[in-house]
Image: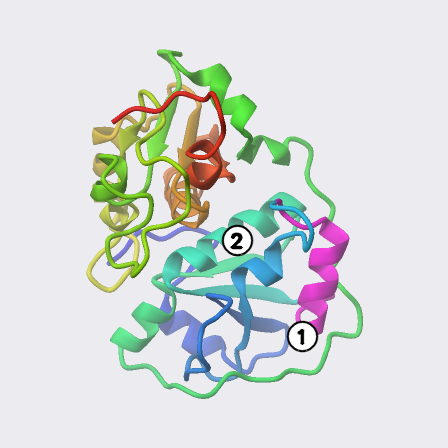
């Protein structure tokens, strides 16, 4: 069994819910992903087009997010199930929409990777009718605390009570690359390295062989080995934010660590800003 939480849905339970009124499944994929088969009845959106402001490298405003979801058929009182391909894209969408105040979110455990690995039914992407009314998004008080900016990170440098958590690959953490080793072009920042003092917790270390979260006991051990406990603030980062959001979901949603934030600019920003320190 994998870890389970009130907002984590396993593939078997999702299959049982397919077609039920009030449940909308949204596959969150790369913006340039080719059309492929996925969960029957699911809509599909590129993660950046869905979640980012069109003119700024920042999360879109809640009203814009609500309109984009409504165009994909998710609005009103619908429960929105986010299925990432890969899994961290779904986690990023969950994190971003949670900050915007979406009241009814579920994350598919393992995303499309687990769905396919378990031999569940596949179909082409759906083209749903737009929702009659958008969901009302009202950021909760304190929700912005789950988002960290570069100035927030600067203030934590050298703080013995804080944990900077690097969710990238070993090559990126060691400063050998600025993008994962399987990328054909090594790009994404001017410099390679890591934020000074950051501990390493590759996002795949939180998952099993099918991309699902580890059982809770193992997840807690892996997190504790990286220094992630409830003792102080945790800021996770990666290259673009989506691998870090997977760590956020594991630590905050599944393990209940209260003060976990995602540095949304991540290494793309930190590795390119003049004057900020790096470590190799």
Identified at 37% across, 12% down, the residue is 158
Which segment did they paint magenta?
A: 58-76
Q: For the N terminus, which image quadrant?
A: bottom left
Q: Residue at x 22, y 38 (%)?
A: 222
Q: Is residue 195 left or right of residue 65?
A: left
Residue 256 seen from this side: no
Q: Secondary structure at mark 1?
A: loop
183 vs 25, left or right, is: left
Measured as percent of width and height from the top left, residue 160 is found at 35, 11
Residue position for label 2: 94
Which residue position holds label 1?
A: 73
Distance from the alpha carbon under mark 2 to that under mark 1: 17 Å
| Residue 58 against residue 78 in the figure, above or below | above
The residue located at (64%, 73%) in the rendering is 22
Q: Secondary structure at mark 2?
A: helix
Residue 148 position by quadrant: top right
Asked whether 60 falls inside the magenta stretch, the response is yes
Task: Please provide percent x and percent y for residue 172.
Answer: 27, 41
């Amino acid at each position: 069994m994998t870890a389970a939480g009130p907002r984590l849905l396993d593939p078997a339970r999702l299959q049982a819910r397919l077609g039920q009124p009030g449940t909308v499944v949204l596959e969150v994929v790369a913006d340039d992903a080719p059309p492929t088969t996925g969960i029957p009845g699911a809509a599909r959106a590129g993660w950046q087009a869905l979640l980012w402001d069109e003119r700024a490298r920042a999360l879109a405003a809640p009203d814009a997010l609500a309109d984009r979801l409504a165009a994909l058929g998710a609005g009103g009182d619908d429960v929105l199930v986010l299925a990432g391909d890969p899994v961290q894209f779904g986690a990023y969408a969950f994190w971003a929409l949670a900050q915007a105040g979406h009241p009814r979110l579920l994350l598919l455990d393992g995303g499309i990777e687990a769905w396919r690995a378990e031999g569940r039914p596949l179909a082409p992407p759906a083209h749903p009718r737009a929702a009659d009314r958008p969901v009302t998004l009202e950021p909760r008080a304190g929700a912005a605390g789950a988002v960290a900016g570069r100035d927030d990170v600067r203030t934590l440098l050298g703080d013995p009570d804080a944990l900077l958590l690097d969710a990238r690959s070993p090559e990126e953490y060691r400063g050998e690359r600025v993008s994962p080793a399987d990328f054909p072009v090594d790009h994404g920042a001017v410099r390679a390295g890591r934020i000074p003092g950051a501990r390493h917790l590759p996002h795949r270390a939180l998952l099993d062989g099918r991309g699902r979260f580890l059982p809770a006991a193992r997840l807690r051990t892996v997190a504790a080995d990286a220094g992630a406990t409830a003792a102080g603030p945790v800021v996770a980062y990666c290259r673009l934010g989506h691998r870090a959001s997977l760590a956020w979901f594991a630590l905050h949603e599944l393990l209940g660590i209260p003060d976990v934030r995602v540095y949304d600019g991540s290494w793309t920003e930190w590795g390119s800003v003049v004057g900020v320190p790096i470590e190799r």
